[in-house]
Amino acid sequence: MHEASVVANIVDAVLEELNNYDVKKVNSVTLTIGDLTQLGTEQLEFAYEVLSQGNILEGSRLIIEPEHIVLKCKECGFQGPARMISMSESGDHDIPVLSCSECGGAVDVVEGQACRVKCMDVDTGDE
Ligand SMILES: [Zn+2]
């Protein structure tokens, strides 16, 4: 499961970061996850729940903020969301089209590849 290794890396990084502070309790960790990463929210939440057992993250909430895909065309300069090919009625498995929706030209991905910790809500010893 790809999500588990992603979350393992994130949990490691977060725990290391928290070592620098006098943290009593972690309330939540917010991640920014790009649509292009193809990481499933439910799988991420499940992996987080498992991997936070027995450390300071146990009981905290994982908040996932999606970053939608933004493409910029190298040909005509159009910038905007990717067209999606629908694979199911629910829209869960839509596949983005990585070409310009105006002229069909090659594009650069401006947004949508993020996979990072956006912020953490913690209680410190000072409060
Ligand atoms: Zn174009």
Image (cartoon, rainbow, N blue to C red):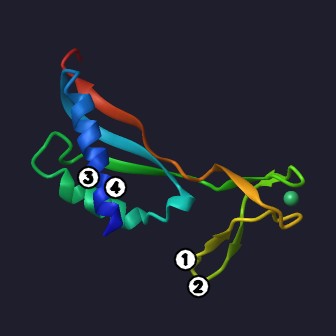
User: Quick check: 110 left or right of 37?
Assistant: right
The CA distance from mark 2 to mark 3 is: 30 Å
Label 4: which secondary element: helix
The numbered mark, 2 or 1, whose residue comes first in the sequence reads: 2
Is disc 1 surrounded by few (<14), some (14 to 19) or many (20+) residues within 10 Å?
some
Which circle marks residue 2 in the picture? none
Q: Which residue is label 4 attached to?
A: 6
Circle 1 SS class: loop
Nearest the camera: 107 or 113?
107
Q: Nearer the viewer, residue 69 or 73?
A: 73
Which residue is the site of mark 2?
Answer: 88
Task: Give yes or no for contact between labels 3 and 1 (Cβ–Cβ under 8 Å).
Answer: no
Among the two numbered marks 3 and 1 on one chain, the one whose residue lies closer to the N terminus: 3
Q: From mark 1 to mark 4, how far is it between C-alphas? A: 20 Å
Instruction: Locate residue 112, reporting x and y percent.
Output: 59, 53
Nearer mark to the viewer, of 2 and 3? 3
